[in-house]
Amino acid sequence: MKSNLFTPVTFGPLTLRNRTIRSAAFESMCPGNAPSQQLLDYHRSVAAGGIGMTTVAYAAVCRSGLSFERQLWMRPEIIPGLRELTDAVHAEGAAASIQLGHCGNMSHKRICGCTPVGASTGFNLYSPTFVRGLHADELPTIARAYGDAVRLAREAGFDAVEIHAGHGYLVSQFLSPYTNHRKDEYGGSLSNRMRFMDMVMEEVMTAAGQDMAVFVKMNMRDGFKGGMEIDESLQVAERLSKSGVHALVLSGGFVSKAPMYVMRGEMPIRTMTHYMDCWWLKYGVRLAGRYMVPSVPFKEAYFLEDALKFRQRIKIPLVYVGGLVSRSIIDEVLSHGFEAVQMGRALIHEPDFVNRMLNEEQARCNCRHSNYCIARMYSLDMVCHCQLDETLPKAIRKEIARIEERG
């Protein structure tokens, strides 16, 4: 099997030096909702490590779209800092992308400044908080915020944007029958549930013009009974193809309902609660966390079977993401006709993994999927336990060892 991993690939107006992309794994490195030196240093390290393009994670298109205190919020005052980041990435020979989205109901008033909004009114255990369903006349304003965020991304020097339409965030909340219980023209049939996505993509494609590549991350399945399944998701993919996007990133799962379907493995609950400040949340999650966040076994390329169904039917470029830690499996994925691959945890553990793959045909990342980085991310920053200078408490070390042994 001849590898094309280190051959250039083109997405619309953008050509990458190879077929690797750092996925938009949330860094939690933006205190004050603005870029930091830590964020710049991390993405520069990934660019220096050989990546074709690195993606800055999950920037909210407006304040109501914030789900974390240390998350980017796209607004004019942060553009100089983002320009420093993109300049640093470009100096290392990589392209720079930024993921744009709105969290919908997965927030809290103390973070987003208002009662969280979503496709429908309800209560979200993720925060936990009551949620207000958006009025139809509010939707054009939020859609325009996506377009405005794309324009700011261009000003900041990004080569591409990735619109988040999966994982149970706002666009996904409109698409999924699990979260969309509306009785108006934005609810009911799939055609109606796609209306908000259509509105967003019209604004995005207009703002992107002819010089920015547009990727969309979408769910192939929501990952639980009552959510979207492949038959409807294929229709969503076809609608996005017609909108003019340059590539789809094929993912799955709902952060508020089936988080480990997205990431796989086990959530280290003791690690997560160790970093929490709120005492009642800390003990509540410690008692009920294993029931709230059930584990899903990890295996390499865990989304491949579903992704192949999209490859057979969807004609535009597709990017595979999910469980890639070895060059041999990456080569296999690319041999099925996917234009590129995304990696997250592998590049948190080893930012120069791509360069190692260039020099070692049997290269394999040593990430053992304890998911410490994810558990820590909710309160601090997303850092691999192997990269820490500090000595972790014994209980956390034991939890990491137990999960890695099982994996």
Image (spheres, helix red, strand yellow):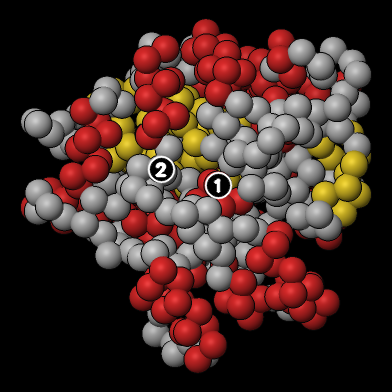
Residue that mark 2 sits on:
302
| 170 to the left or right of 214 | right
Asked whether residue 167 appears in the rendered view, the answer is no
Mark 2 packing: few (<14 Cα in 10 Å), some, or many (20+)? some
Instruction: Tell me the residue at 45%/77% (across/down).
Output: 402
Instruction: Tell me the residue at 65%/39% (across/down).
Output: 224
Q: Mark 2: which amino acid? A: Tyr
Is 6 placed above or below 191 here? below
Q: Quadrant of residue 225?
A: top right
Q: Considering depth in this image, is 261 or 103 the residue closer to the camera?
A: 261
| 11 to the left or right of 238 | left
In the structure shown, which secondary structural element does the residue marked by tag 2 occupy? Answer: loop
| 184 to the left or right of 339 | right
Quadrant occupied by the N terminus: top left
Is 376 placed above or below 180 here? below
In the structure shown, which secondary structural element does the residue marked by tag 1 occupy? Answer: helix
Residue that mark 1 sits on:
261
- Distance in Å between CA atoms under marks 1 and 2: 10 Å
Mark 1 packing: few (<14 Cα in 10 Å), some, or many (20+)? many
Q: Considering depth in this image, is 284 or 161 the residue closer to the camera?
A: 284
Residue 324: % across, % down: 33, 47
Instruction: Tell me the residue at 86%/27% (across/down).
Output: 181
Residue 41: % across, % down: 38, 62
Residue 374: % across, % down: 53, 63
Residue 134: % across, % down: 87, 31
Instruction: Tell me the residue at 20%/37% (across/down).
Output: 331
Q: Earlier in the sequence, mark 1 or mark 2?
A: 1
Quadrant occupied by the C terminus: bottom left
Q: Mark 1: which amino acid? A: Tyr
